[in-house]
Image (cartoon, helix red, strand yellow):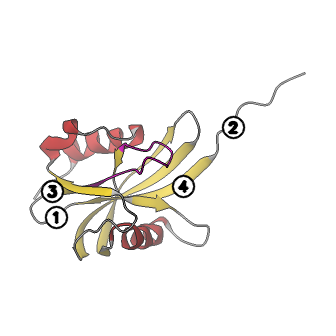
């Protein structure tokens, strides 16, 4: 008898690489009680069935860190498999927004420079975003 292949649950999420006027990047730390708790990531969240990735991004950044996104440019798409699930990510760069980031969900948030990335332990999927950001993004 053939056994069915293991199929991991797949989550679709929108992620925002928020860059301020000083070229600092906003990162947040996953709460300990969540999957992959304690790792750093770029803010964002799940895309609901009735919204586009960009709509999800705008909603998630408002809910998660209190920012109003004025402009978001597509940056990359990627798929990553973790041991317990997989993720399909639509990644945007945000350089135009209103507000100051707040820890609305109790998560730790921080502005960092691109040189500081190695000082933080990021989720595996975020590592690919960081590589592209550092090497290919056209910094002002």
Please state the extent of the stretch shown in magenta in the rendering: 26-39
Q: Main secondary structure of the magenta part?
A: loop
Contact between marks 3 and 2 (CB within 8 A): the answer is no
Question: Mark 2, residues whose alpha carbon is within 10 Å: few (<14), some, or many (≥20)?
Answer: few
Q: Nearer the viewer, residue 82 or 138?
A: 82
Return the residue found at the far top: 1
Q: Earlier in the sequence, mark 3 or mark 2?
A: 2
Is disc 4 placed on a helix, strand or loop?
A: strand
x then y, percent, for residue 94: 27, 65
x then y, percent, for residue 65: 33, 67
Residue 12, numbered label:
4
x then y, percent, for residue 22: 9, 61
Is disc 3 placed on a helix, strand or loop?
A: loop
Mark 1–mark 2 Cα distance, whole angstroms, equals 39 Å
The residue wearing badge 3 is 24
Asked if 37 appears above or below 63 in the picture, the reply is: above
Question: Mark 1, residues whose alpha carbon is within 10 Å: few (<14), some, or many (≥20)?
Answer: some
Mark 4–mark 1 Cα distance, whole angstroms, equals 26 Å
Contact between marks 1 and 3 (CB within 8 A): the answer is yes
The image quadrant that residue 118 belongs to is top left
Q: Earlier in the sequence, mark 1 or mark 2?
A: 2
Q: Earlier in the sequence, mark 3 or mark 4?
A: 4
Mark 3–mark 4 Cα distance, whole angstroms, equals 26 Å
The image quadrant that residue 23 belongs to is bottom left
Q: Earlier in the sequence, mark 2 or mark 4?
A: 2
Judged left or right of residue 6, residue 52 is left
The residue wearing badge 1 is 20
Please check the rendered image and state whether residue 38 is part of the magenta-colored stretch, yes or no. Answer: yes
The image quadrant that residue 48 belongs to is bottom right
Judged left or right of residue 47, residue 104 is left
The residue wearing badge 2 is 7
Q: Quadrant of the C terminus?
A: bottom left
């Amino acid at each position: 008898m053939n056994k069915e292949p293991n199929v991991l649950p797949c989550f679709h999420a929108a992620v925002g690489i928020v860059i301020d006027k000083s070229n600092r990047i906003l990162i947040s730390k996953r709460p300990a009680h969540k999957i992959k708790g304690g790792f750093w990531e770029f803010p964002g969240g799940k895309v609901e069935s009735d919204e586009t990735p960009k709509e999800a991004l705008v909603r998630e950044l408002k809910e998660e860190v209190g920012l109003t996104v004025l402009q978001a440019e597509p940056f990359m798409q990627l798929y990553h498999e973790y041991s317990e699930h997989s993720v399909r990510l639509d990644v945007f760069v945000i350089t135009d927004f209103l507000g100051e980031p707040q820890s609305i969900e109790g998560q730790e948030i921080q502005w960092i420079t691109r040189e500081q990335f190695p000082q933080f332990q990021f989720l595996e999927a975020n590592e690919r975003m960081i590589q592209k950001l550092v090497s290919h993004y056209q910094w002002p």
